[in-house]
Image (cartoon, rainbow, N blue to C red):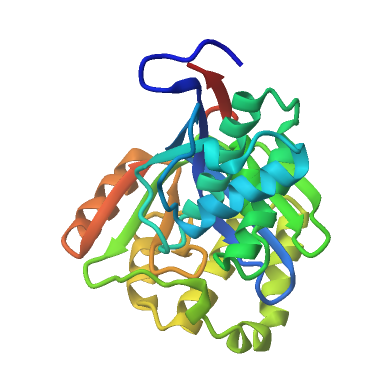
Amino acid sequence: MGDQDHSGIIKKATGVAWGAVTIINAIPTGIGCAFGVDIPVRSRIRLKAHPVEKRFDPLIEACIKSFLMKTRGCRGSDIDVEVDSSIPPAMGLKSSSAVSNATCLGLNALLEAGMDKMECIHAGVDASMRSGVTITGAFDDACASMFGRAYLTDNNRRVIISEYHIPDWRVIIFIPEDASPRPKSGIDIEPFVRMKDQYMEAVRHARRGELVQAMRINGLITAGILGDDTELIKKVNEMGALAGGTTGTGPAQAFIFDDRGSLIRAGRFLEKRGRVIYTGPAEKEGYAMVV
């Protein structure tokens, strides 16, 4: 595994994955769609000569256990993990999928386990389910976070239905001024289930490759269910957004644009009402390197 350095570190690796935003929420139907955005998450992992006296976030703990169960590698107590993320947690921006992917990619490189990226996704989804940070397994989010494109998936069976190339969209992520994190444990799924037919209409659009139409339907329905500001969403759409609304279970909202003028107008409007992040589709797949 390499020579031990003066700090007791035997080997170091870094895994990188991306945030993502929702096109279709998977809660009511089990079918979800998301695309990756250019907001990186880095998981820095060290293999140490002695046990690490540190308690990790439950998701990180679950990732380590999930990965080691699959690889039968070293003891988890020898592994130290530090996550560097620009994604606000529990806001609907797929921070859990990104952290899981980055951590599993880093562990794969560190332990030379030879797992491919899809196997790393499955390990991360297992960890997310065990730690309670997802309702559906978020397989669509995990694929988007890992590969950076858009994915329509059956989350119950963990099957990719379709993969899409994303146009050169400009993206605004908006976090309302009074927003607070929404842990999945606090989400009532019944209102989503009652709207199943409307979500299935979005799924039909996505199956035809009509992602903008799917996102329009999803964004407003989801916002209405969760009590988010639907009038604000309509206003931004009137300013030229192709589509937008609540991403995941919010409270963050995501809007896509195909021209700079509309982006600027909407951005100025939203900046007076909360935090605005300007980004675009992720430009490459997640990756890992030994450092």
Residue lying at the far top of the rendered structure = 3
> In the shown orientation, is residue 199 left or right of residue 262?
right
- Residue 46: x and y in percent read 48, 29
Locate residue 168 relative to residue 197 in the image: left or right: left
Left or right side of 291 for 7: left
Most foreground residue, 290 or 97? 290
Residue 24 in percent (x, y) is at 62, 63
45 up-or-down from 240: above or below: above
| Label tally | 0
Q: Position of residue 151 (x, y in %)?
A: 69, 48
Q: Nearer the viewer, residue 287 or 274?
A: 287
Instruction: Say which of 224 and 288 sits in front.
Output: 288
How far from the left and from the top, in percent, is residue 239? 33, 58
Quarter of image, res 194: bottom right
> Would residue 41 appear left or right of 62 to someone viewing this image?
left
* Whether residue 257 can be seen here: yes
Residue visible at 35% across and 55% down in the picture: 88
Q: Nearer the viewer, residue 239 or 221?
A: 221
Please tell me in which quadrant of the rendered image residue 110 appears.
top right
Residue 214 visible somewhere in the drawing: no
Q: Residue furthest front?
A: 50
Q: Residue at x 54, y 65 (%)?
A: 133
Q: Work out whether 125 lies above or below 129.
A: above
**Residue visible at 64% across and 64% down in the picture:** 130
Look at 61% across and 16% down and name the residue there. 1
From what the image shows, is residue 6 above or below residue 67?
above
